[in-house]
Amino acid sequence: NDYYLTATSSSPLLSTGGSSSGAAATIAHGSALLSIGTDTGGSLRLPSAWTSTVGFKPTYGTFSRYGVVSYASSLDTVGFVTGSVECARIGWECLTGNGCDDGGRRNLNGNDDDDVERRWG
């Protein structure tokens, strides 16, 4: 068998579920402080609930989707899983920069042109 179950830390018989379940499993295992994934209909939030981790799906366009394979373009959102709300706050602060390559990305830090000039000018 080439396929294996991504199990929860509490039971090898229970799946973490969701297409971003690896992100939740990684955090629950303690292998990382933050793991990025995508959420269209609960793919980050549900595995987080099942593994007692923190799943964060921000408002659409908060993080760049550049490079993400689209399933439902108006619903696909890049988010992350962490082990605590404090780690989620730090992750938010680190990841809310401007994604110049994504037309669906909102600019949270002011004028897009000013930010591009500052970064690449």
Image (tube, rainbow, N blue to C red):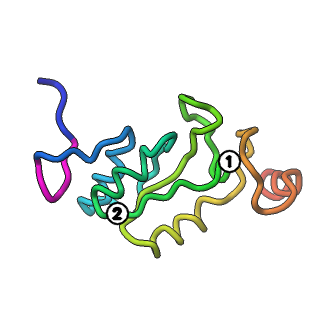
Q: Residue at x 30, y 64 (%)?
A: 52
User: Which amino acid, by three-letter code, is at mark 2?
Assistant: Thr
Q: Which mark is residue 61?
A: 1
Q: Residue at x 30, y 43 (%)?
A: 17
Decide which of 76, 65 is in the foreground and name it.
76
Question: How busy is the neighbourhood of tag 2: few (under 14 within 10 Å), some, or many (20 plus)?
Answer: many
* Residue found 71% across the figure and 39% down from its top: 102
> Residue 64: where, in percent of width, then height?
64, 46
Secondary structure under tag 1 reads: loop
Asked if the stretch drawn in magenta spans residue 67, the answer is: no
- Residue 109 placed where, x, y %? 78, 63
What separation in Å lies between label 1 and label 2 (alpha carbons)? 23 Å
Residue 16 spot, x, y in % from top left: 26, 47
- Give the numbered dot on residue 25: none
| Tag 2 secondary structure | loop
Q: Main secondary structure of the magenta part?
A: loop
**Which residue sits at x=45%, y=46%?**
42
Disc nearer the start of the sequence (1/2): 2
Which residue lies under the disc numbered 2? 53
- Counting every numbered tag in the picture gives 2
Q: Which residues are magenta?
A: 6-12
